[in-house]
């Protein structure tokens, strides 16, 4: 019988089969667990880094966008009317929209949040000025601290930047101007009087050129009608202006080029909001950026009339909002000394740092804006332990206001 053959009736033998022992199985499972933990740890660290990078990048990007918008608005502040600063700066604004008075704001018609507490010293009154700081007039819930409000005003006509003098008395529906170059139907006009009021700067009125206006004449009669027209607004009447008054083209709502008369401030939820005082946009209250923790600003002042910045100051004392907006000749003179503004934003990440704890927070206990201006002008924010778990960025811009730098 040959080798490897089985005997008749006998089962063939099975080959020897080896398996894993319990110890080997446990070792394999332990190795797999270590590998899994290592992979999860690497992925978690990568995700944490990605979220931190995205949060920081988003915060910086949003802050840069907000700063670019503020820079644009500040650089154009005073456009269209700064040439008549001596009799227009500080004039009490009067305006209607569709027959409803919007300036001065009627009693019982407060500004919407976050600007409900904004005051220039007289309830509902806003006076003409290129750029103002209403110090500490919003308190956003994100920080629980007072934050500044900017009041920015500029014309956007782009065609007729020079004042147009009166060639005769105005009627309730018509202006008589010595030049109408650049005017068109639907143009908004800012009308102010060179004749000072007994208490200081005379009131000014916003009106609208009628759509029927024929610009080919170049001078003479300008009919008034439209959304922003009224013969009398509060105490200001068209017939009350003297022949020394001037009219300034400040923009065209219908052509998408309205004047800028806006409040800018931080509201709840970290929203940097704007409010259009003339309600040329719908809605008048709009969000400019999110993730904003605080806004603060300083004035740049020319002290000797050479149109060069000499010093910085806070919005206090003679430069407090109420002092600049009292309508006096002294306030008008102070408004003309403001030639620059420095604005600082504190941005905060949307969520706490994932690796942070109160014992080792990622943010210092204080944040400082305008540190290079010295302790009397810097703005310091002290953070709580819970607030320090977030990441912050401070952004600052210094903006020369070119229309004021060119004043004589």
Image (tube, rainbow, N blue to C red):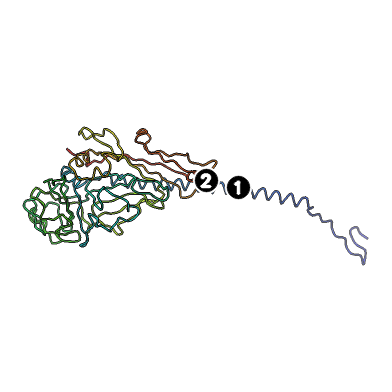
Q: In the rendered view, tell whether residue 319 sits above or below residue 94.
A: above
Q: In the rendered view, tell whether residue 205 sits above or below residue 226.
A: above
Residue that appears at 22% across and 38% down: 337
Q: In the rendered view, tell whether residue 196 sits above or below residue 2.
A: above
Q: Nearer the viewer, residue 200 or 73?
A: 200
In the rendered image, the quadrant that contains the N terminus is bottom right
Q: Which numbered disc, 2 or 1, marks the residue that appears first in the sequence?
A: 1
Circle 2 — which element? helix
Label 2 – label 1 distance at C-alpha: 12 Å
Residue that appears at 17% across and 47% down: 161
Q: Quadrant of residue 56?
A: top left
Give the number of marks. Answer: 2
Circle 2 sits on which residue?
49
| Image location of residue 253, percent across then percent down | 22, 57
Identify the mark at residue 232; answer none if there is no mark.
none
Circle 1 sits on which residue?
41
Neighbour class for label 2 at 10 Å: few (<14), some, many (≥20)? some
| Image location of residue 272, percent across then percent down | 36, 50
The reply, left or right, for residue 333 in relation to residue 376 is left
- Kindly check if marks 2 and 1 are in contact, taking CB atoms under 8 A apart as contact: no
Circle 1 — which element? helix
Residue that appears at 22% across and 39% down: 334
The reply, left or right, for residue 62 in relation to residue 172 is right
| Image location of residue 40, percent across then percent down | 61, 50
In the rendered image, the quadrant that contains the C terminus is top left
Q: Nearer the viewer, residue 77 or 263?
A: 263
Q: Nearer the viewer, residue 72 or 34?
A: 72
| Image location of residue 70, percent across then percent down | 32, 46
Residue that appears at 87% across and 60% down: 13
The reply, left or right, for residue 266 in relation to residue 365 is left
């Amino acid at each position: 019988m040959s080798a490897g053959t089985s005997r008749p009736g006998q089962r063939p033998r099975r080959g020897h089969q080896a398996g894993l022992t319990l110890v080997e199985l446990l070792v394999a499972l332990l190795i797999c667990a270590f590998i899994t933990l290592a992979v999860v740890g690497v992925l978690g660290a990568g995700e944490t880094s990605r979220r931190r990078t995205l949060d920081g990048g988003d915060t910086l990007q949003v802050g840069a966008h907000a700063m670019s918008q503020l820079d644009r608005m500040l650089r154009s502040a005073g456009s269209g009317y700064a040439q008549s600063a001596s009799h227009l700066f500080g004039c009490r604004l009067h305006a209607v929209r569709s027959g409803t008075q919007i300036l001065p704001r009627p009693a019982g018609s407060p500004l919407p949040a976050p600007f409900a507490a904004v005051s220039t010293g007289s309830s509902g009154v806003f006076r003409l000025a290129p750029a103002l700081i209403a110090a500490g007039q919003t308190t956003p819930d994100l920080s629980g601290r007072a934050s500044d409000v900017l009041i920015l005003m500029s014309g956007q006509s782009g065609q007729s930047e020079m004042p147009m003098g009166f060639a005769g008395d105005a009627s309730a529906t018509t202006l008589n101007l010595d030049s109408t170059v650049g005017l068109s139907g639907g143009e908004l006009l800012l009308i102010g009087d060179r004749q000072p009021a007994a208490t200081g700067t005379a009131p000014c009125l916003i009106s609208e050129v009628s759509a029927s206006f024929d610009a080919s004449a170049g001078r003479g009669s300008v009919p008034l009608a439209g959304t922003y027209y009224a013969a009398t607004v509060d105490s200001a009447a068209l017939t009350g202006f003297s022949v020394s008054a001037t009219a300034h083209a400040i923009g065209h709502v219908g052509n998408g080029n309205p004047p800028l008369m806006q409040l800018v401030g931080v509201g709840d939820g970290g929203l940097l909001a704007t409010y259009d005082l003339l309600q040329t946009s719908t809605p008048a209250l709009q969000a400019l950026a999110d993730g904003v923790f605080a806004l603060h600003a300083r004035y740049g002042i020319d002290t000797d009339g050479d149109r060069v910045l000499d010093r910085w100051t806070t919005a206090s004392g003679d430069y407090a909002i109420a002092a600049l907006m009292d309508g006096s000749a002294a306030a008008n003179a102070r408004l003309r000394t403001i030639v620059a503004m420095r604005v600082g934003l504190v941005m905060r990440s949307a969520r706490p740092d994932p690796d942070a704890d109160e014992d080792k927070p990622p943010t210092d206990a204080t944040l400082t804006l305008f540190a290079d201006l010295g302790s009397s002008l810097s703005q310091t924010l002290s953070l709580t332990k819970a607030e320090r778990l977030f990441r912050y960025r401070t952004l600052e811009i210094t903006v020369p206001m070119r229309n004021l730098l060119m004043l004589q």
